[in-house]
Image (tube, grey):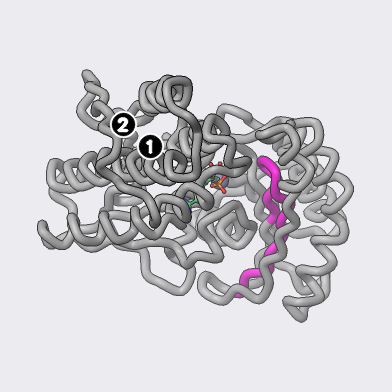
Amino acid sequence: MITLGVETSCDETSCAVLEGRSKIRSNIISSSLFRHRPYGGVVPEIASRHSLEQIDFVFREALRQGGVLASDLDLVAVTRGPGLIGSLLVGISFAKALSFGLGIPLVGVNHLEAHLKSNFIGRAEPSGYIGLIISGGHTSITDHRRGRTLILGETVDDACGEAFDKVAKILGLGYPGGPVIERLAKQGDPTAFRFTKPRQENRFNLSFSGIKTAVLYLARKHRVTRTFQKNVSASFQAAVVSWLVDKAVDAARFKKVKCLVVGGGVSANGYLRESLLREAARYGLEVCFPPMALTGDNAAMIARAGLERHQKGKRDSLKLTGDPNLRLA
Ligand code: KG4
Ligand code: ZN
């Protein structure tokens, strides 16, 4: 079974060829990041126009590198949400045209679910686990068992990756913030600044807008030197990661599951990986992280999630459309 994945939910345009559930034959990603940098964040109109410009080339390149012809494709899977509506519609329209033209089934995929499924390309999916989705637009803790998903907690304000991006912007470090904060944090003192852990009524909810405001006030009070940038980066990263680790491990213990599955752009963070592995080991929990190449937005994870839906008998019609606010459950 050869699945074509199509992902255009935000600033990446990606097509992938997946053979079965485990062999990525190609995974082409064209980022429009360089076009958003001058604005310090993603500009939706620029993102959708970039996708429109790139999608045909990215598709052809995915076929070429994957060593397949369009006529070899058995299924097309496309992100239907959540995301930017203009960007989503580019991928969805392209996927619908392929489905109609090639006479192959079409499956719409939830982008967040796909971030977790990026762990299960060539690795078996456990029957029950706690999901931790940490991306630029979403942060959630979910309970997965017998194919059903239950949301245990979510951010009540900013997403986790968004907090990295906003703090980087305050510190004058550019966009996106995650990678540069991780790099600077290595040279900073994580105890230089203390941030208060937000209290939530729901024990699995998270909040990141308070720490962003705290950093803003710090930056107003201090001169923003390189040392200051390093110390804030280290202190901010240590705080955010400790909150994520505490809640995820608490959820696994509360739900009595033995496995944590992490997905989304922030799962690339090495400090988070080490901290979560260390804390999980104390309670005998296993942790799955996606391969580094699949932490950001990519079409291989969409193909993987779409194939599973297809194997469960799910199909979408040509009426499929984008849902910017699609929920996980
Ligand atoms: O999953 P993703 O590629 O896009 C969304 O679906 O939102 O996540 C992008 C987010 C950005 O906020 C970026 O700053 C963050 O992931 N990110 C990181 C790292 N690499 C990317 N955050 C922390 N540490 C990193 N190494
Ligand atoms: Zn994403």
SS for tag 2?
Answer: strand
Residue at (60%, 73%) from the top-left corner? 24
Q: Position of residue 85 (x, y in %)?
A: 71, 30
Which residue is at the front of the view, 313 or 35?
Answer: 35
Residue at (43%, 44%) from the top-left corner? 227
Q: Is residue 156 above or below residue 127?
A: above
Q: Is residue 294 above or below residue 201?
A: below
Q: Locate the C terminus by quadrant.
A: top left
Q: Mark 1 sits on what residue?
A: 140
Please indicate whether residue 262 sits to the left or right of residue 102 in the image: left
Q: Main secondary structure of the magenta part?
A: strand
Q: Mark 2 sits on what residue?
A: 153
SS for tag 1?
Answer: strand
Is the residue indicated by label 1 positioned so its CB lies within 8 Å of ligand 1?
no
| Quarter of the view holding residue 39 | top right
- What span is colored magenta in the figure? 6-19
Q: Position of residue 290 (x, y in %)?
A: 44, 62
Residue at (40%, 72%) from the top-left corner? 123
Q: Position of residue 217 (x, y in %)?
A: 42, 20
Tell me, yes or no, if residue 133 can be seen here: no
Picture disc at residue 25:
none
Please name the amino acid that badge 2 sits on: Gly
Circles 1 and 2: CB distance less than 8 Å? yes
Q: Is residue 241 magenta?
A: no
| Quarter of the view holding residue 280 | bottom left
Q: How many marks?
A: 2
Q: Position of residue 169 (x, y in %)?
A: 57, 33
Q: Locate the N terminus by quadrant.
A: bottom right
Distance (Cα) linking label 1 and label 2: 6 Å
